[in-house]
Image: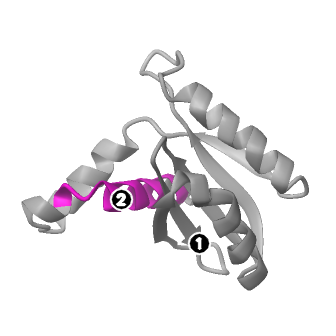
Amino acid sequence: MARLLCIDYGLKRTGIAVTDPLKIIATGLTTIESKQLISFLKDYFVKEPVEKIIIGMPKNWDDTDTHATPLVEKAIKNLKKHFPQMPLEMVDERYTSKMAKDAMLEMGLKKMQRRNKALVDEIAATIMLQEYLNR
């Protein structure tokens, strides 16, 4: 059975999460440099079957675009170019970074661990994907 893969795309880093093959649980996979995304996905898709890519779309609370929206739109075009057969769905990523930081606090991570932006991005992708599964 194929997995779902979720991307929290950013200028420098991209958090990635995947589901289990039964699509029940979302798990953080990794955080990579954003410029490595296409090559990472090409390798990953060879190793694991993926049914769909979920990508977080940054929006303000009033549904207007953020400064990061054009960046994510460019990434989506690039994904469609390299993986034209792969379904891609955009989801609201509002507050996922805040939720990730709160989750890290609740997990009891020390202050230095909570400053790890790569971990925040991976957890944010996991939160987005789990919310997608819960819908």
Where does label 1 land, which residue? 19
Pointers 2 and 1 in contact (C-beta within 8 Å): no
**Mark 1 falls on what kind of element?**
strand
Q: Position of residue 116 (x, y in %)?
A: 25, 59
Q: Is residue 132 visible?
A: no
Judged by depth in the image, the label closer to the viewer, 2 or 1, is: 2
Q: Quadrant of residue 77?
A: top right
- Confirm whether the magenta stretch covers residue 121: yes
**C-alpha separation, residue under disc 2 versus residue under disc 1:** 19 Å
Left or right side of 21 for 11: left
Q: Which residues are magenta?
A: 114-129
- Residue at the spot 38% in from the left edge and 60% down from the top edge: 123
**Mark 2 falls on what kind of element?**
helix
Say which of 16 and 129 sits in front: 16
- Residue at the spot 41% in from the left edge and 53% down from the top edge: 124
| 9 relative to 58, above or below | below
Q: On residue 118, which mark appears?
A: 2
Q: Position of residue 101 (x, y in %)?
A: 24, 51
